[in-house]
Image (tube, rainbow, N blue to C red):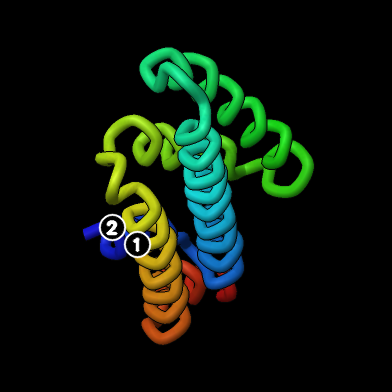
Amino acid sequence: MLAALSAIFSLRTDHQQTFKFALSRCIGNTTGGVVAILLFYVRAVLPFPEYTDLLLAPVGIVIIILFCNRFNKTGVINSCATFLVIFFNVEAGQNTAYAIQRILDTIIGALIAIGVNHLLPNPHLKEQQS
């Protein structure tokens, strides 16, 4: 289902915009997933896990914002959403597998959107070229 959503969200009016947005989504989901996985390992060694979530979640968001401001300005919201979903909504034993699955689903969906945009004719572009 995540691959289908990624394909829908990545599809844009032309091939160049689709590629840029798909790349931004892939980088964003990867950033959020990697930060969540890293903070899971940090949380495992810290005492009082119920309180460390209150500390680590803002730290994760700050790390993501700093990274995205430097490398992927359009992916901040996507990265933060991915991080929060993985960090708070996935059970402890499945978080790494879910993060990897979410990243792969996003890449698959983005590739599908690029393929659809490249292979199917776009009537809007024909009107603009005329």
x, y (%) of residue 54? 46, 15
Left or right side of 53 for 1: left
Residue at 58% in and 37% down? 76
Q: Mark 2 Cα within 10 Å, few/some/many (few <14, many 20+)?
A: some
Q: Which mark is residue 7?
A: none
x, y (%) of residue 114? 46, 74
Examine the image and state in which quarter residue 107 appears: bottom left
What's the amino acid at mark 2?
Leu
Residue furthest toward the left? Answer: 1
Element marked by disc 2: helix
In this view, the residue in front, 48 or 122, is 48
Residue at 58% in and 56% down? 27
Label 2 sits on residue: 2
Q: Are marks 2 and 1 in contact (CB under 8 Å)?
A: yes
> What whole-number distance in Å separates the C-alpha atoms at marks 2 and 1?
9 Å
Residue at 78% in and 42% down? 70
Label 1 sits on residue: 101
The earlier-in-sequence mark between 2 and 1 is: 2
Q: Mark 1 Cα within 10 Å, few/some/many (few <14, many 20+)?
A: some
Residue furthest toward the bottom? Answer: 119
User: How many badges with numbers are in the image?
Assistant: 2
Residue at 57% in and 30% down? 60
